[in-house]
Image (spheres, coloured by chain):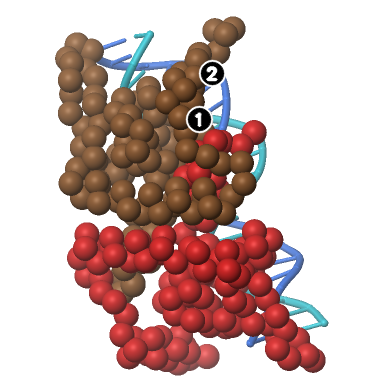
Chain colours: A red, B brown, C cyan, D blue
Amino acid sequence: MRSPCPISNTLDIIGDKWTLLVMRDILMFEKSLYSEFLSSWENISTNILAERLKRLEVAGLISKESYQTNPVRYHYSATPAGKTLKPIIRAMGKWGLENLSGTRKPTKHDLESLGARNRRSSL
Amino acid sequence: MRSPCPISNTLDIIGDKWTLLVMRDILMFEKSLYSEFLSSWENISTNILAERLKRLEVAGLISKESYQTNPVRYHYSATPAGKTLKPIIRAMGKWGLENLSGTRKPTKHDLESLGARNRRSSL
DNA sequence: CGGGATCCGTCTTGATACTG
DNA sequence: CAGTATCAAGACGGATCCCG
């Protein structure tokens, strides 16, 4: 049976780190490709990413649309419901900035250098 | 190395369901006793609860204070830093109410009946 | 008896290798 | 490059024990 508490129910859907990080990438960093999520600083692994994308889609928070065939490639984006998560994510960002040392807003430069960091030199 | 992203760092501390549920109990439902956390609707188990309380204390978000000796009993409460989590939790509650069917604000009556539900009749 | 600690079986998570 | 298979590690639920 389901809890009557809205907080608890919300946590059942987005109460895990990786799920929220994917939504952060989509909502705050405007990422939309599988490869872009993979290249995020936190290094999500491929199976986790695929599974979270599926769950988020089932939950109606994101949708995927193919932008190319052969091979098929997808573009993920937030649904209207997904976009309403922004206040939660923003609140977390604000909290981190105010309460955790060593954090700051990522700069444009950060976002660009991320790609470089993830291209392992020896591969 | 630590992520430069405040959202990610926040998630490393409170990015899990049980941690947030404990903070919900403290911040929104004014619970303060181990037994009160245990009796929450979601039925957290003792090992998980004890571990989360410890982590939250180490993180400086809650503090415990003994209110009785022999045997010693504790009273948990949010530190000033812990209290600043309220906007995040409120945002989650709001999101749940607006996006999840079957949720509602718990009433005083709900909170009281919870205790009854947890006193297993056959024990 | 209340506040845990500990052990155990199970299920989930996650890193990595692998495939189309 | 997007996603699946594999398998080890960890999280969890539940029971039990422990200590004051």
In terms of depth relative to the viewer, which is nearer, B19 or A66? A66
* Callout 2 crowding tier (Cα within 10 Å): few <14, some 14–19, many ≥20: few
The residue sitting at 32% across, 36% down in the picture is B26
- Quadrant of the rendered image containing residue D5: bottom right
Q: Is residue A77 above or below residue B50?
A: below
Helix or strand or loop: what does disc 1 sit on?
loop
- In the rendered image, the quadrant that contains the N terminus of chain A is top right
Residue A98, can we see it?
yes
Residue A114 picture location, percent across and down: 40, 86
The image quarter containing residue C16 is bottom right
A102 lies above or below A106: above
Q: Secondary structure at mark 2?
A: helix
* Relative side of B12 to A31, left or right: left
Residue occupied by mark 2 = B117
Mark-to-mark CA distance, 2 and 1 = 9 Å
Label 2 resides on the chain identified as: B
Q: What residue is shown at x 37% (from left), y 22% (from top)?
A: B35
**Residue at (78% x, 90% y) in the render:** A69
Q: Which mark is residue A112?
A: none
Closer-to-camera residue (B74/A15): A15
Question: Do labels 2 and 1 touch, CB within 8 Å?
Answer: yes
* Residue D18: x %, y % from top left: 35, 17
Question: Could one spot residue A34 in this view of the protein?
Answer: no
**Which amino acid type corresponds to the residue marked 1 in the rendered image?**
Trp
Location of mark 1 (residue): B41
